[in-house]
Image (cartoon, rainbow, N blue to C red):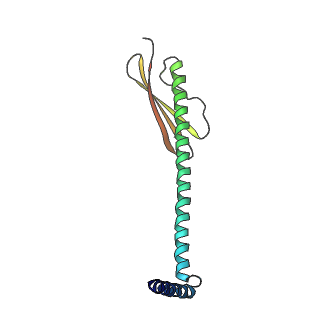
Amino acid sequence: MKKLKRDRLGMGLMRIFQRLGRKEEGSTFAGQLVALAILGITISVLIGGLFSSGAGALTVRQEVDAHNIARTQIEAIKRSPLATSYTPLPTSSSYSVDIGVEEIGTSLQKITITVTSVHQSRTVCVLESYKRGTP
């Protein structure tokens, strides 16, 4: 007897759920707008992330190139004899190099290499070193 009541109760619930399921055919316009908004926001965030990572990679690349140019300039100056000014080595057309010389003593100089991006007009790297000459 108890089993029969459970079966009837279960069948009654199944009928209710079936009726509810029949009434919801398709989706509403508001539901579609919400889904579209969520999709748009997600895609915007992903595209923004891609662009910012690309810009970051470009900045790092410029800084590495500028640092390499400055190191090459310093090495060339250290191999040359002591002078009051030095001529920059030729570099790519994307960068300009400025060499500053400060006399610290009779045989010691502070050399400052400034590498500037020509296209962006900004200083990318400043490298300082010391050069000792023979007294």
In this rendering, is residue 16 above or below 74? below
Foreground residue among 35 and 64: 35
Quadrant housing the N terminus: bottom left
Q: Which quadrant of the figure has residue 43?
A: bottom right
Foreground residue among 32 and 43: 32
Query: Looking at the picture, how far across and down is residue 19, in whole percent?
Result: 54, 88
Query: Looking at the picture, how far across and down is residue 26, in whole percent?
Result: 59, 83
Q: State left or right for residue 115 relative to residue 103.
A: right
Q: Residue at x 55, y 82 (%)?
A: 29
Q: Residue at x 41, y 19 (%)?
A: 108
Q: Residue furthest left?
A: 105
In this rendering, is residue 70 above or below 47? above
In this rendering, is residue 58 above or below 31? above
Quadrant housing the C terminus: top left
In this rendering, is residue 77 above or below 46? above
Can residue 117 be seen here? no
